[in-house]
Image (spheres, grey):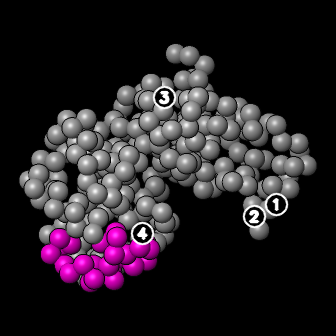
Amino acid sequence: MNAEQRLLLDAHERLAAYYEIDRWHWREATPSLDICLGAILVQHTSWVNVEKALANLRAAGAMSLGVIEALEEEKLALLIRPVGTPLTKARRLQVFAALVRQAGGFEALFAMPADELRALLLSTPGIGPETADVILLYGARAPAIVHDAYTARLLRRLGVGPVRDRYNDWRAWLDEHLPPDAVYRRQHHAAIVIHCKELCRVRPKCGVCPLLDVCLFGQALAPAEAVALNVGARL
């Protein structure tokens, strides 16, 4: 185990101890349908808006792939309007619903080898690398890697990561450095997102961060700057 791997493992242990990771919106018992719909709807919006859209689908009795595929596009778009670009995302949901139906359901779809499933998802309109990897990691429960802006922010501040910031470079680097365990990788990604929303923000709260003593970014801040950032972050 090299120094970067030790840092990642140590950072995760600290975050897992500091936060209640189970408050993450995708848990081990979360249905595949909820995960996949959420993964598509959350593109370019906040999770709060996704929750509103999912609540609308449930209230309308439309929380099923069969209903989603059969609904008129405009009616589906109205239900998911809180997430923005509703017509575009309505089409994406219906295309995904058709994909699952053609595969024979979620169980058959997720029984595919991970590489084949990822390629199939990436060939589906509206599903890019991050969305595909979210579906693999949380929906199919495969030991996939999900990279996002939060991961890049935290790990760059810790002083680690690949040379280039392309998605596939991060994906390969994380796959090499993280334990090959699906549960660990789900918790690892969740912990990073929670931490970056709570403390490691664009304007971070470094003074109360559980990673401060191993964070190059936080240590580089003068005490006065750290205080100013923390005050500003609370406003």
The mark closer to the camera, 2 or 4, is 4
Q: Is residue 227 above or below residue 166?
A: below
Q: Which of 123 and 174 is in front in this view?
A: 123
Marks 3,2: beta carbons within 8 A: no
Which range is magenta?
Answer: 67-90
Cα–Cα span, label 3 and label 4? 30 Å
Q: Which amino acid does label 4 sit on?
A: Val
Q: Which residue lies furthest to the top in this view?
A: 1
**Which residue, given by chain and number where applicable, does mark 3 sit on?**
173
Q: Earlier in the sequence, mark 3 or mark 1?
A: 3
In the picture of the structure, the residue carrying the numbered disc 4 is: 50
Distance from disc 1 to disc 4, alpha carbons, whole Å, reads 30 Å
Q: Which of marks 2 and 4 is nearer the N terminus?
A: 4
Q: Where is residue 224 in the image (x, y as percent from the top left)?
A: 91, 49
- Disc 3 to disc 1, C-alpha distance: 35 Å
Residue to which mark 2 is pinned:
234
Asked whether residue 71 is drawn in magenta, I would say: yes
Helix, strand or loop: magenta stretch: helix
- What element does badge 4 sit on? helix
Q: Is residue 94 magenta?
A: no
Q: Is residue 111 above or below residue 160?
A: below
CA–CA distance between discs 1 and 2?
A: 5 Å
Front residue of 14/153: it is 153
Disc 3 + disc 1, Cβ < 8 Å: no
Secondary structure beneath dot 1 equals helix
Q: Of the residues shown, which amino acid type is indicated by label 3?
A: Trp
Q: Residue at x 37, y 28 (%)?
A: 180
Q: Which of marks 3 and 2 is in front?
A: 3
* Residue 28 in view of the camera: no
Q: Mark 1 points at which residue?
A: 231
